[in-house]
Image (cartoon, rainbow, N blue to C red):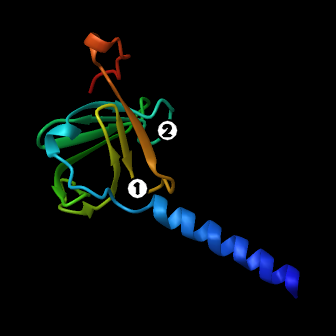
Amino acid sequence: MGCRSALLAVVAVSGCASDREQQPLGQVADPADLTGDWTTGAWDLYSTAFIDSTQIVFDNHIDTLYRYNWRLDSNILVLRDILGDELRPALLKLTEDSLVLASMPNHREPLRYSRCEDPARSLPSCGTV
């Protein structure tokens, strides 16, 4: 029975750590900090995000574009498609060069983006939409 108790304690600690990773930012994000081109560096469903002041376009570099109007509600990124359906991923991290969003449809893990398309800092191009 002692071994089971130890195993359950490990599972509980592991569960708590993943819960902390899913918490939104502690401070309120500035919408202007989101604008620009971002890449995960991987060829997956949401590999590139092109963000301007009103729209965000996710591109997988093959054949799919997801286009949304966006706004921030505290540190929740509210995405609205052309049909009016909303997604609400939490903004987990936002720095000058890093953006982390909570999971999106068909992508359970957080999306970790790096900024790109900045010739002044020799960052790579994300492509074009």
Quadrant where the N terminus is found in the figure: bottom right
Residue type, numbered disc 2 = Asp
Which numbered circle lies on residue 102?
1
The quadrant where residue 26 appears: bottom left
Camera-nearest label, 1 or 2: 1
Which numbered circle lies on residue 89?
none
Q: Position of residue 59 (x, y in %)?
A: 36, 35
Residue beneath label 2, please? 44
The quadrant where residue 36 appears: top left
- Residue at 18 percent of width and 50 percent of height: 70
Depth order, front residue of 104/2: 2
Residue 114 located left or right of residue 70: right
Q: Position of residue 93 (x, y in %)?
A: 35, 47
Are the residues at dot 1 and dot 2 in contact (C-beta closer than 8 Å)? no
Residue type, numbered disc 1 = Ala
Q: Is residue 113 above or below residue 71?
A: above
Q: Judging from the image, what secondary structure is the residue with disc 2 in?
A: loop
- Residue at 63 percent of width and 70 percent of height: 13
Residue 33 located left or right of residue 25: left
- Residue at 79 percent of width and 83 percent of height: 5
Disc 1 residue crowd, few under 14, some 14–19, many 20+, Cα 10 Å: many
